[in-house]
């Protein structure tokens, strides 16, 4: 049963990483200290005894490894944001940083500009912005508007021939051969 659960998790991580790699040229993740999170949650066992198991079961390390090799194989890029970047404590509107915020705070209002934030949504916005900033610093061209990035005509052929023309030539330009 444990092997089946493990295989199901691995299958999910492979499918999700493949989907993200197929839909994106760059993926930005936060470099989480998973071992530290697990040990910290064990010391707080009386508050949430399932947290360390949930963190371990999520397979974040495996997931980022899958993303890294699949993006590299496809010519994409994985950008890792430093674990000390204050993604959830930084206002994505005015960039004011809150000094202290316990993990049980899920929503907060910026004392500087008054913007109300969902902690996770705000962190995602900040991680994306930091990833774009890092790419620009590296000299990588960035177009992160969230629009369509694939050509509308579908995938290009890997074959070494010209595509077959499906429509007749314009009238008056018939070829004589």
Image (cartoon, grey):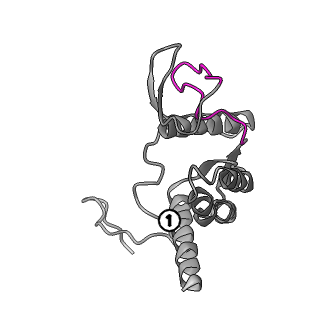
The image shows residue 95 at horizontal and vertical percentages of: 59, 21
- Between 52 and 63, the one lying in front of the other is 52
Q: Which residue position is annotated with label 1? A: 156
Query: What residue is rendered at 51% in x and 64% in y?
Result: 16
Secondary structure state at the residue bearing disc 1: loop
- Between 25 and 92, the one lying in front of the other is 92
The image shows residue 161 at horizontal and vertical percentages of: 53, 73
- Taking the image as drawn, is residue 144 in sight? no
Query: What residue is rendered at 40% in x and 55% in y?
Result: 152
Query: What residue is rendered at 68% in x and 39% in y?
Result: 135
Asked if the stretch drawn in magenta spans residue 87, the answer is yes
- Taking the image as drawn, is residue 50 in sight? yes
Residue extent of the magenta highlight? 83-99
Locate the N terminus by quadrant.
bottom right
The quarter of the displayed image where residue 60 is located: bottom right
The prevailing secondary structure element of the residues shown in magenta is loop
- Between 54 and 136, the one lying in front of the other is 54
Residue 94 horizontal side relative to residue 152, left or right: right
Q: Residues within 10 Å of mark 1 (few under 14, many from 20)?
A: few
């Amino acid at each position: 049963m444990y092997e089946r659960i493990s295989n199901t998790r691995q299958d999910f991580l492979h499918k999700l990483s493949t989907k993200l790699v197929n839909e994106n040229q760059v993926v930005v993740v936060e470099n989480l200290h998973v071992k530290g999170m697990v040990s910290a949650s064990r010391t707080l066992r009386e508050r949430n005894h399932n947290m360390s198991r949930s963190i371990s079961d999520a397979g974040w390390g495996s997931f980022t490894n899958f993303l890294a090799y699949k993006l590299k194989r496809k010519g994409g890029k994985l950008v890792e944001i430093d674990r000390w970047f204050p993604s959830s404590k930084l206002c994505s509107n005015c960039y004011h940083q809150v000094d202290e915020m316990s993990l049980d705070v899920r929503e907060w209002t910026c004392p500087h500009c008054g913007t109300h934030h969902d902690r996770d949504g705000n962190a995602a916005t900040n991680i994306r912005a930091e990833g774009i900033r890092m790419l620009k610093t590296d000299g990588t061209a960035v177009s992160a508007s969230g629009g369509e990035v694939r050509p509308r005509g579908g995938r290009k052929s890997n074959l070494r021939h010209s595509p077959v023309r499906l429509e007749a030539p314009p009238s008056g330009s018939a070829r004589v051969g």
